[in-house]
Image (cartoon, rainbow, N blue to C red):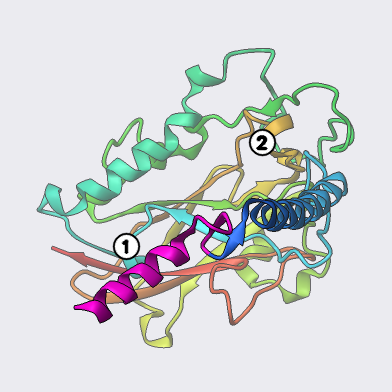
Amino acid sequence: MSGNKDSDGGWRKFVWNSEKKEFLGRTGGSWFKILLFYVIFYGCLAGIFIGTIQAMLLTLSSYKPTYQDRVAPPGLSHTPRSEKSEISFSKSDAKSYKKYIDSMKNFLELYDDGRQSEQQNYEDCGDTPQTYRERRSVESDSGQRKACRFLRSWLGICSGQSDPTFGFQEGKPCVIVKLNRIVNFRPKAPSNNQTLPDAVQAKLQANTIPIFCKNKREEDENKIGEIKYFGFNGGFPLQYYPYYGKLLHPQYLQPLVAVQFTNLTLDQELRIECKVFGSNIDYSEKDRYQGRFDIKFTVNS
């Protein structure tokens, strides 16, 4: 029992030594000095961290990325999106394609003609392809830039206005295609027509980034049928570029191309690849959406 008392007394004495006025083995002055040291030490670390962050922020622009020398060409994306880029539905079952047409309706709401009526935010840029429309430097904070109007009705039967099912009900599905946004990027029209597919050369227009879709597998060559393009004759017109970013160009509308597959072979899995062609747009095996995409269709009767 005496041993336990001695051990208890030693522990209590370590916590508070009334003779030496020590708490946990240190006097009040010692505790003050060590706490002061750590306050100053961690304060200096915090100051260095905040200083380096502030110095880095001084090198960044609010309007465009500071370093764009390694920015990849824009990706090519499509609506409706689906898991693994597979679109499978049955013509006779409206529920099987409802999610696709809902996705397209939601996406195209921004392109409704009535939403582009404000003159202070939108302007007409013509209904034929033209060269870039410059709106002052992206570095200048001189107010928001106007956006070119892109009317939903230009997408024809794929606009969802005359056919609210976007062709799915008839087994002739549409997809809406766009080039992803890159601040201050200016896509360049193809410089060598000899490298373009014959179908693209036949309809190529100046000031246009053409798009072309075809079968991805050789065995599907005779199963795709006719492909129709709506918008600016199957291309992205240059007057919609450059894009100035969310701060300066909040109303910006990307130009769209609607692609309709009018005669897909039923009850078969078909792989289709779509590409855009431009002198500063290339493709990467590591990124299947860089300048192109492929999509798998299965249309059941």
Where disc 2 sits, the SS reads helix
Percent x, y of residue 45: 76, 57
Image quadrant in which you'd find residue 162: top left
Q: Residue at x 64, y 55 (%)?
A: 31
**In the image: residue 282, left or right of residue 229:** right
Q: Name the residue type under label 1.
A: Asn
Are the residues tagged 1 and 2 within 8 Å (C-beta)? no
Vertical relation: 221 (above or below) 163: below
Task: Give the labeled residue for mark 2.
Answer: 246
Give the quadrant of residue 290: bottom right
Q: Is residue 148 magenta?
A: no
- Identity of the residue drawn at 59% across and 82% down: 285
> Is residue 225 visible in this depiction of the protein?
no
Q: Which residues are magenta?
A: 1-24
Nearest the eye: 54 or 195 = 54
Q: Is residue 6 magenta?
A: yes
Residue 156 located left or right of residue 64: left
Q: Position of residue 180 (x, y in %)?
A: 60, 53
Which quadrant: the N terminus?
A: bottom left
Picture residue at 46% right of the left edge, 66% below the top: 14
- Residue plotted at (81% across, 55% down): 48
Amino acid type, callout 2 = Lys
Q: Nearer the viewer, mark 1 or mark 2?
A: 2
Q: Secondary structure at mark 1?
A: loop
The one nearer the camera, 98 or 143, is: 143
Can you see residue 279?
yes
- Work out whether residue 248 or residue 101 is closer to the camera in this orientation and state it: 248
Left/right of residue 51 with respect to residue 117 in the rendered view: right
Q: How many marks?
A: 2
- Horizontal and vertical percent for residue 277? 68, 65
